[in-house]
Amino acid sequence: MIEVHHLNASRSRRITWLLEELGLPYEVVCYQRDPVTNLAPPELKAIHPLGKAPVLRDRGQVLIESGAIVDYLLRRYGAGRFIPVPESVDYDRYVQLLHYAEGSAMLPLLLKLYVGRLGAAGMPLHPRIESEIQNHLGWLDSELAGRAYFVGSELTGADVQLSFVAQIAVRFGGREAFANLTAFVDRIEARPAYQRVVARSGA
C-alpha cells in the first residue's frame, strides 16, 4: 500500500489528488505541527530526517520532494497518462513547469509568509517580495491564455504540481486578480478525482 505522510498546512494535497487520478489505493498518515514552533513532530522525522511533507513510501522506498514524487508515480504507475511523449516539445515544457513550481514560483510566496512574521522589521522587504509575486503569478496567468491546462490540452503532472501555486494566487489575491489562474483552479477542483480527495480528507 502506498503511504502519503502528510503534515498539516503542507503541500500534500497534490500527491493525494494525483493518486486519485491514477486510481491507486493509498493511505494518508497525518501529523500535526508543534503549536509553538510550527515544526514537524519527531514522528515525521522518523520517516525522513528532514521532517518535511509530503513524503511517499512505496515498495520499500521513501521519496521526498513533490516534483520527484509526481515524476515517480507517473513513471511507475501512469502507463503514459498525464505526461507528454518524451520526444515532444510539450515534454520539454512539462519538465520545465514541473521543476518551476517549487524551484522558482514558491520562493516569493514563502518569503511573504516568513517576512510577514517579522512585523515592522520586515517592512522594507515587502515591496520587492510583492513585485516578485506579481511577476511570477502574472507570467503563470499569461501561460494559461487560450488553454485549459499548462501543457497541451489535457491534465499533466505539471498541472498537479502547479495547482498549489494557482490556488494560493486565487485564495489570497482574489478571483479577479488573475482570471486564467482562477479558471484553472475552478477546472481542477471540479475534477471527480479532486472531489474524491476533498470528500476523503476535507477542503
Image (tube, grey):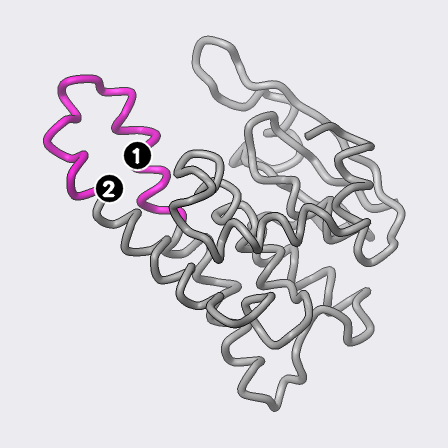
* Residue 56 vertical position relative to residue 97 in the rendered view, above or below: above
Q: Residue lying farthest left?
A: 124
Number of residues whose C-alpha sits closer than 10 Å to that of mark 1, classed few (under 14), some (14–19) or many (20 or more): some
Q: In which quarter of the image is residue 118?
A: top left
Instruction: Give the total of numbered labels.
Output: 2
Picture coordinates of residue 74 (x, y %)? 73, 65
- The boundaries of the magenta stretch are 106-129
Residue bearing the label numbered 1: 112
Picture coordinates of residue 79 (x, y %)? 82, 73
Residue at (43, 38) in percent of width and height: 174
| Quarter of the rendering occupied by the N terminus | top right
Q: In which quarter of the image is residue 110?
A: top left
Number of residues whose C-alpha sits closer than 10 Å to that of mark 2, classed few (under 14), some (14–19) or many (20 or more): some
Q: Are marks 2 and 1 in contact (CB under 8 Å)?
A: yes
* Residue 89 vertical position relative to residue 102 in the rendered view, above or below: below
Q: Residue 199 carries which label?
A: none
Q: In this view, does 112 lie to the left or right of 31?
A: left
Residue bearing the label numbered 2: 130
Residue at (65, 55) in percent of width and height: 69
Secondary element under disc 1, as helix, strand or loop, is helix
**Would you say the magenta stretch is mainly helix, strand or loop?**
helix
Q: Does the magenta stretch include residue 196?
A: no
Q: Residue lying farthest bottom?
A: 87
Q: Does the magenta stretch include residue 121?
A: yes
Question: What's the amino acid at mark 2?
Answer: Glu
Secondary element under disc 2, as helix, strand or loop, is helix
Question: What's the amino acid at mark 1?
Answer: Lys
Query: Closest to the observer: 53 or 111?
Result: 111
* Residue 199 vertical position relative to residue 154 in the rendered view, above or below: above
C-alpha separation, residue under disc 2 versus residue under disc 1:
8 Å
Picture coordinates of residue 78 (x, y %)? 79, 67
